Structure formats: structure tokens, C-alpha cells
Amino acid sequence: MNADTKKLISNQYGRVNAAPIERCRVNFCTDMEKSVLMSNFERRGWNQVGQDEEWNFYWASTQTCRNLFSVESGYRMNDNQMINHFPNHYELSRKDLLVKNIKRYRKELERESSPIAEKAEVILPGGQVANRYVHLDFIPVTFVLPADYNMFVEEYRKSPQSTWIMKPCGKSQGTGIFLINKLSKLKKWSREAKAPFHPQLSKESYVISRYIDNPLLIGGKKFDLRLYVLVTSFRPLKAYLFQLGFCRFCTVKYDTSVTELDNMYVHLTNVSVQKHGGDYNNIHGGKMSVENLRLFLEGTRGRAVTEKLFSAMQWLIVHSLKAVSSVMANDRHCFECYGYDIIIDDQLKPWLVEVNASPSLTSTTVNDRIMKYKLIDNMISVVLPPDGIPDVRWNKTPSPEALGNFDLLIDEELLEKEDVTCTGRTFKGHKSRN
Ligand SMILES: Nc1ncnc2c1ncn2[C@@H]1O[C@H](COP(=O)(O)OP(=O)(O)OP(=O)(O)O)[C@@H](O)[C@H]1O
């Protein structure tokens, strides 16, 4: 890092260690020289090394992490090495696998007759009756195409006036996403895309989800929430929720008319989509803090329902993590920060849209930069033992001071002792499944 960059960071975030090399006890390695990462590592006086050198802390891309853990690499980590991904993070972050794991988790709980898997009848928009989970109905009804095409058609026919959203499983940033309100549109697209619903011919799988067409609007605009969740272990599950999440707004007012169905500035909240819109605001970047959302909701809807919404979001996160905890490679060298994308509907019910294993560390505004700097700083404090040196033999129990802006979401080790849930809902007799 050159002197100018160092000075800049020093001005922005306060003290920078003047002579890091002598005091440095951690060697870090990174594939991503993002300023919020580099300034954090620098401030801690860490020393940058290459992948082939002796590193203690690796901030890697998901691909590098998978490569390191692959059998072919033959790499074995030491007790003093930590890395920022679990090797099979995709069980949670791939759109199709997330849905598959949640469906399996619900079925397993149902088989165990768990009260969490209770079901009740609901009336669909078309008047048809469907049996839905009372406590685990937090992902929109979703099918994987082409595999589940027939099941999708059956569901589609139950309420043909519903809108659906098609998303390619392996893409991000809104690429390849479109809405459909007629089966014929899907069939037409399928023909034009050269029979993607033929399992042998299709190159790419998609998820098709019921479109949440009644989102909560603020100023007439749709938004979603980006929340950060840090997982330090899947078995036992240990997870933390960052208090400083934010809402991402569309730039164009919400409109469900058919003519606006293809207008992505109305329907997709991704910053990567919205920043190309004519009404994008560079100062606030279409973002609002979760704290301001809470104040807005307390003022307009009341405290009790706002509390209920926030605890429902925690519930949703905990159960999505539990849904994958048995399939995750729970390597003790790993931790991971997930970006949770959640849409709130006008009944104040939260819906899980997606989980990102590499949430963007690019800052679009000044507030964004401050928040992301804190996110990384707090994350490092939580995952490292009190002496600040990676050691996988540590019991991964950070002190309250180390949490910073993280709140404990769940610690199954503690739950074993106390028999309560951190999310405020307690189901007597429901024990950890792992
Ligand atoms: N079921 C849904 N109902 C309503 N809106 C949805 C739904 N699914 C997705 N969206 C909207 O579409 C946007 C993009 O969807 P999603 O985040 O799943 O895909 P992506 O853009 O490919 O992923 P990434 O966030 O990794 O870039 C969401 O931010 C949300 O605004």
C-alpha cells in the first residue's frame, strides 16, 4: 500500500499503525483488494502475503476457497489458518439448492411431527384452498425448471392470475430475470431459448417463484432488505446478525399493470439494475438504513407489529441456516458472511428472496463505506480469539465487546444449556436436530 493510500485511510478511519511489519502477528492473503478490506487489515497491522506463502487469514473469492478445499489441491490447513467461506456455501447461496434444502428441511420436521412444521389451509387469490406451513412459509412458492415443469404447471393452474418471476440459477445482479403472467409467455420463451425445458438439451436451470406482488411500498416504491449474517459454525449452529442492514429502493414507482411487467426499474431492487436508471440518486444510492425503516414502521404501523416483523425476519434466517446445517461442510477453519435479501409484503410478512455468499463490498455512498468498514471490522473481532490470532482450537465464543454491531442470533451450544431460542419464539420439545 503506498503512502497516499495509507494517509487516505488514516484520515477516513482514524489511526493507522505506523510501523505494522514489526508488530504484525497475522499474515493475510486476499483475492480482493477492496478498500474496506485493505484498510481494516492495515489498521490491525497485518502483513500481506501471497497464496503460496504462510498465511493465517485468507479473504478469498468463493472459487479460490473451493479450489483450496478440493481434493486435487492437496492443501491442508493448519490450526492457525482461517478462511472466509465454507467450501459448499452454494447449498445456501444457489437459488435452486436453497429451495431444495428448505423443502427437505420442512419435510423432515413434518415427519418428526415437529410443531414447527404445522400446516393450515389458506385461500389462494383464485379462491382455491392450499395447505401451507404456518411457521415455515417464508420462501415464495418456487420450482426448479426444467426439472419441476409439470409441478409448476399444476400450481400455476390453481391461480392463473398470479405473476411469476424467472431467475437463472447461476447468474446474479438481475441478469436474465423476467416476469411472466401467462403460461403461454413461458412456452414462447422456452421455444425461443431452444427448448431449455428439455432436461437433456437445457444448459441452464432456472427457478420460477411466485412473484410477491403486494410488496410494502415506501413513497410508492418497492424495496428489499439487505441483512448481513455471520456464521462461525454450522454444527453447532452459531450465527450473528449485523444491526446495520439497509433497504434498496426501486427508482420508479411500483405499478402492477401488464404494460410495466418488463420494466425492471419497477420490479427489481438490485443496485446493479437501478443505478442505470435515469432517476438513480448518487448521494443516497436508493438506500435507507434498517434502523430508519424500523422507526418508519413504528410510526406508521405501531411498535407491536414492527417487533413482530423483525422477530419474523430473525426466525426466517435461523431456519434457513438450520435447513442447510446438516449438509454444510462444517470445516472449523471457515466462517462466512451472508447477504440476506428479504422482501416485506404489505401485510408485514417477510419473504426470503436470496442468500449471497459474497455480498458486495463495493461502496456506493459515504454511509455505505462507513457501514461496510464496520462490518468487516466487527466480523474480524467475532471470528478471531481474544488475542487476535487465528486459532481453530478456540471455542468460538466471542466476548460481548467483540460483537460490535453484531447481535447473537443463535448459538446451539448455549441453547442446549438454556432450552430457549434466541428469536423469541419457543417451541417446547424442539431440540437441535444436529
Ligand atoms: N419472488 C419475488 N417476488 C418479488 N420480487 C422478487 C422475487 N424474487 C426476486 N425479486 C426481485 O428481483 C430482484 C433480483 O432477484 P434475486 O436477488 O433473487 O436475483 P439476482 O439479482 O440474480 O441475485 P443477486 O442478488 O445475487 O445479484 C430482487 O432483489 C427482488 O427485488
Image: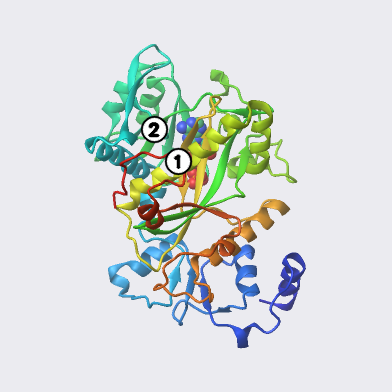
- Name the outermost residue toward the front: 418
- Spatial distance from mark 2 to mark 1, Cα to Cα? 9 Å
- Which label is found at residue 350? none
Q: Is any part of residue 186 visible from this angle?
A: yes
Number of numbered callouts drawn: 2
Q: Which residue is drawn at 47% across and 43% down?
A: 423
Residue 331 horizontal side relative to residue 378, left or right: left
Give SS at disc 1: helix
Where is 335 relative to 4, above or below?
above
Instruction: Give coordinates of residue 122: x percent, y percent.
Output: 38, 19
The image quadrant that residue 39 belongs to is bottom right
Tell me which corner region of the image, top left, top right, bottom left or bottom right, holds residue 396: bottom left
Q: For the residue marked with disc 1, what is the amino acid?
A: Trp
Q: Can residue 172 be seen in this view?
A: no
Relative to residue 140, is residue 371 drawn left or right?
right
Q: Name the residue under label 1.
A: 315
Please state the horizontal and vertical placement of residue 383, each as a whole percent of the image.
Answer: 49, 66
Helix, strand or loop under label 2: loop
Q: Which of 384 and 151 is in front in this view?
A: 384
Tag 2: amino acid:
His
Lateral position of residue 367 relative to residue 27, left or right? right
Q: Determine contact: label 2, label 1, CB under 8 Å.
A: yes
Q: How crowded is mark 1: few (under 14 residues within 10 Å), some or many (20 or more)?
A: many
- Residue assigned mark 2: 135
Q: How crowded is mark 2: few (under 14 residues within 10 Å), some or many (20 or more)?
A: some
Residue drawn at 57 percent across, 40 percent down: 225
